[in-house]
Structures are given as structure tokens and as C-alpha cells.
Image (cartoon, helix red, strand yellow):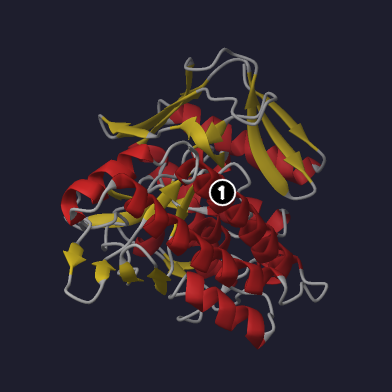
Amino acid sequence: MTFIDADDDVVSDLLASTLELLAESGGWLHPDATVVARDGQLSLECTADDDEPLLVIPRESFVRVDAMTWGDDPLTMTISALPDDLGDIETSMAYVQAALHNQTGKLEWLRRTHPALAPLPEAIVDRMRHLVPGFRATEMTPIDVLLSDRCLRVDLGDGRGSQRVLVPILDLLNHHPRGAQAQWHDQAFSVATARSFGGSECALDYGHGRDAMELAAIYGFADTAATVAHSATVTCEIPSTGPVVVTASGRTVTGEFPALVVENRPDSIHLSHLSFDSEGMDGLVESLSARLGHDTRSIADVLAGVAEENIALLEALVTAGVQDSPAAQVLADAAAHQVRVLHECISDLRRP
């Protein structure tokens, strides 16, 4: 059976209620799994081998957060209205999950530590907007951020189209780029065991190939395992090719990057966006060489120059100071890691 290891008796009871509702809906967790709660932080551990089935969460256990009305208190999750078509399990699960997040102090913790919410010096906000243009463009409450961070978007076939759903227990899995992928089939999410952190904690890949800066801005943590770095809007002068402009046109509404647009203009090279990967740059070099008609050495110089421009932007964020702020420290740590990723890419590009 699944165990609960919590440092708060009320949290333990709420987690037990969550598991009971999950079982009632036909869902299950691996019998060697443990739900862990420490200082308000929740995670899922399992001693099973990687790739073994870890959990299945059926549709009946999902909480359709956009179909219900939340209370006005930004630091307490209260439900003021529910749609008429909620089943008994979903209704009970909604109240249990709200109580769980209240008991763990999640909203106050987010208000204090999340870069999207916590007070930050204007210099840090400005520098972040060079790297993540939409950073803090919309004012959000702690409940907004919590639901944005913890929900998945899925079409449940109920006529509402794609909508956000809170998937209990699955939402306890922290991100790792080599974590498991959530699989949606037969009106249920399933996840395999992936102990990517080096211990028994299980991980989930949140998808979309986000880099450390995006993860910090959206989810509020510094991912020091990320291997990718997406370029900001930069312009640089490359001796062998001339000016290079990366416009960082951004992602589509589904969170994906559009097809790369490459223009070899008479006076400059223009790229719609550019992504670096410390696990290998050869494929990108060869692709751009073929599309632009420049030799691979010149393309490597282009990419190294763009990387150096991004490093300058990231280092400006690091040196803006953390101001004794957990949120600013998250951004500084993420930026420092992204600098390391880009230096690794430059070393790859400049190898003999």
C-alpha cells in the first residue's frame, strides 16, 4: 500500500482522504510509493525501478478548476460556487485539495518566494523582461499562480474544449528534464517511475523543453539540470558573416516553438528564434549551414556570438543583486545555470 510520511497530522489526514478518493475513482499508486510532506512541501517517492508504472489518475478524480468559482481571499483557497455537472468524487476532491493547499500554507509561500508574485527591484524585472518578455506582464494572485503551476490542460470531451484540470497526486511530482512523461489515454493520466534526482523522489518532465529562465519565471524554481537555453532578442556582429539578429519570436499558444525562420538578407542574417543545447550543437550547426549557405565554421561563430550576447544579459541579471529576496535568488540561480549551459555550448562550438 502507498504510505504517507508527513510532519503535520492534518496534512496527513488530507493526503489520506486524497488517496481514498483516488481509489474510489479506480485510480492507483505503486504499492512502494510514499507521499512525503515536509515543511509544507509535497513530493512523491518510490523505491521501484525506473519505468515501472507509478500511478494512474482517472478523469473522475480531476478537479476542473476553471469550471468553479474561487473566493476573493488571495491567500486562502475557498470555493464559492460549483458547476452542476460535478460528480461526488470531483466535488469532494476539490474541497480536499483546497484544504490541503491551505494547510501547507502554499499560497503565502508562493506570495513570498515566486518571481511572478514576490516584490522585486525594478532593475531585476527589467532584466528578466529581456530574457522572458512576458515576465510579470499580467498581474496574478497567488491562487492564479498555484493553478497555473499545478494544472494540466486537456480536452475532457465535455464540450468545454481544452481546459485546466488539477490532477491530484500527479501534481506532487517535481520537474526534471529527464523525468517521466505524463500519458493521457482512456480518460486517465498515467506516469511511470523516474527517479531522476538521484534518490527515491520521482520526477515529471513538465514538457515544452523549457530552459532555466522560463521555468523560474513560470514555476518559481531554478532548474539546475536544464540542458537547453533559448535565446533572447539579440543582435551581434560576426566577422565572418556580418550582423546577426535573433528576434526571439516566442512560442505558439500551445507552448511550442514555431518552425525556425531563417533569412539570409543582403546586409544581415535574421533568425526567428534560436535554442542552444549543451548535449550537442552539431545538428543545429549543420542545419543552419545548409539553409544559409555558410560553412560550418562560420555558423559555429554565429552561434557562439549569439550565446555570448545572451550570457551578457544573464550576467546583468545575476549582478542586479538578490536583495535578501528568495524570488530574486531563484532568478539569479537560474541565470547562473543558464550561463553555464551557454558556456558548455560555446566550448562545443569552438572545439577543433
Residue at (65% x, 84% y) in the render: 123
**Residue 345 can be seen, yes or no:** yes
* Figure quadrant of the N terminus: top right
Residue 300 in the image: state x and y as whole percent.
39, 50
**Residue 140 can be seen, yes or no:** no
Residue at (63% x, 52% y) in the render: 337
Q: Quadrant of residue 329?
A: bottom right
Q: Is residue 44 left or right of residue 59?
A: right
Residue 220 in the image: state x and y as whole percent.
60, 60
Q: Does residue 29 sit above or below 94 in this rendering? A: above
Question: Considering depth in this image, is 233 or 238 the residue closer to the camera?
Answer: 238
Q: Tag 1: Cα neighbours inside 10 Å, few (<14), some, or many (≥20)?
A: many
Residue at (38% x, 59% y) in the render: 302
Q: Is residue 59 left or right of residue 145?
A: left
Residue 99 in the image: state x and y as whole percent.
63, 54
Q: Quadrant of residue 301?
A: bottom left
Q: Write down the residue under mark 1.
A: 341
Residue 76 in the image: state x and y as whole percent.
64, 68
How many numbered badges does the structure rendering display?
A: 1
Question: Considering depth in this image, is 261 or 333 the residue closer to the camera?
Answer: 261
Q: Is residue 285 left or right of residue 325?
A: left
Q: Does residue 154 sit above or below 214 in this rendering? A: above
For the residue marked with disc 1, what is the amino acid?
Answer: Val
Question: Considering depth in this image, is 162 or 343 the residue closer to the camera?
Answer: 343
Q: Secondary structure under badge 1?
A: helix
| Residue that extends furthest to the bottom in the rendered view of this protein | 122
Q: Does residue 224 sit above or below 67 in this rendering? A: above
